[in-house]
Image: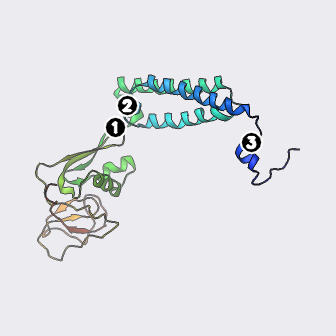
Amino acid sequence: MADPIVAFDLQRMFLGDHPALFYAEIIFRTALVYGYTLTLIRWIGGRSVAQLSMVDLLLVIALGSAVGDATFYPEVPLFHAMLVITLIVGLNKLLDTLIERSDVAKRLIDGRTITVVSDSRILCEALAQRDLSPLEIKSMLRMRGISNLGEIESAYLEASGGLSVFRRAQAIPGLAIVPPLEVETPAAPQPGAKAEICCTNCGARRAGRSARPDLPCPDCHRDQGWTATTCPPPGG
C-alpha cells in the first residue's frame, strides 16, 4: 500500500522523489526537445508565424502537450515524444500544402472571407455564419480607430480572423459606436423627427419621416432601438 500523501510536504512539492542527477536530465530533455521542435517549426515556413489560423492553433495545442510531457516526465521516452512532434508538424505541413494548392481545401480547413459591413451597415446575416454579434464587430472596429459606421464603405472578416476595413473617401452620417452601447444607451429619436435615424444594432439608416421607430429594424429584425444618425468626427 502506497504511503499517504502528506499535505504541504515541501520536499515533495519542490524537489519530488527523484535523484539529484534527474535535474540534469531535465535540462538535457528540455534543450533537445526545444531545439528539435524549433527546427521543425522553421521547416514549416512563415505562414504559421505570420498568422494564427485554425490549423496553426491546433498545432500549438498539440505541440504544447507533446513538448511539455517529454521535458520532465521520466517515463516518457524522448524518441516517442520526438516521433509525436514529427507527426504533428508533418501533418500541419501537409495541410498547409493542401490549403496553398486547393481553394476547396482552403475553404474547408481555413474557412472563407465574409463581408461584415457594407454601405456603413453591419450585415447580421453574415455574422451568423461565424457565430459573431454586432457588438463584437463594433469592438473590433473601435480597436481600428473607427468611431462611427458612417466612416466605413466596407469591412471583411478574413479567414484568419482579422478584420479588413475600407474607409469612405468622404464620411457620411451613421451610427456612432463610441461610446459603446454597453456604456451609454443612445438617445431615442424624437417623435416625428425629420432627421435620418439608424438602428442601434446594425446601423441601417432610414429617413426619419418615413421610419417607424416603434417597430423592429427591417434589416436585422432586432428591436434594440433607433437613434439619430451622427456625423463622424473630423478626420474620420
State the residue in front, 96 or 41: 41
Numbered disc 3: secondary structure: loop
Q: How is the image coloured?
A: rainbow
Vertical arrangement, residue 17 with respect to residue 34, above or below: below
Q: Are marks 2 and 1 in contact (CB under 8 Å)?
A: yes
The residue labelled by disc 1 is 112
Residue 216: horizontal and vertical position, in percent?
Answer: 28, 66
Which numbered marker is on residue 231? Answer: none
**Does any portion of residue 74 appear in the rendered image?**
no
From this view, report whether residue 104 is shown above or below residue 209: above
**Disc 2 target residue:** 106
Q: Which residue is mark 3?
A: 16
SS class, disc 2: helix
- 62 over 142 or under it: above or below: above
Q: Is residue 175 left or right of residue 62?
A: left
Q: Quadrant of residue 213?
A: bottom left
Q: Amino acid at mark 2?
A: Lys
> Do the residues under discs 3 and 1 have CB atoms within 8 angstroms?
no
What amino acid does circle 1 point to? Arg
Question: For the residues marked 3 and 1, what is the alpha-carbon distance in whole angstroms?
Answer: 50 Å
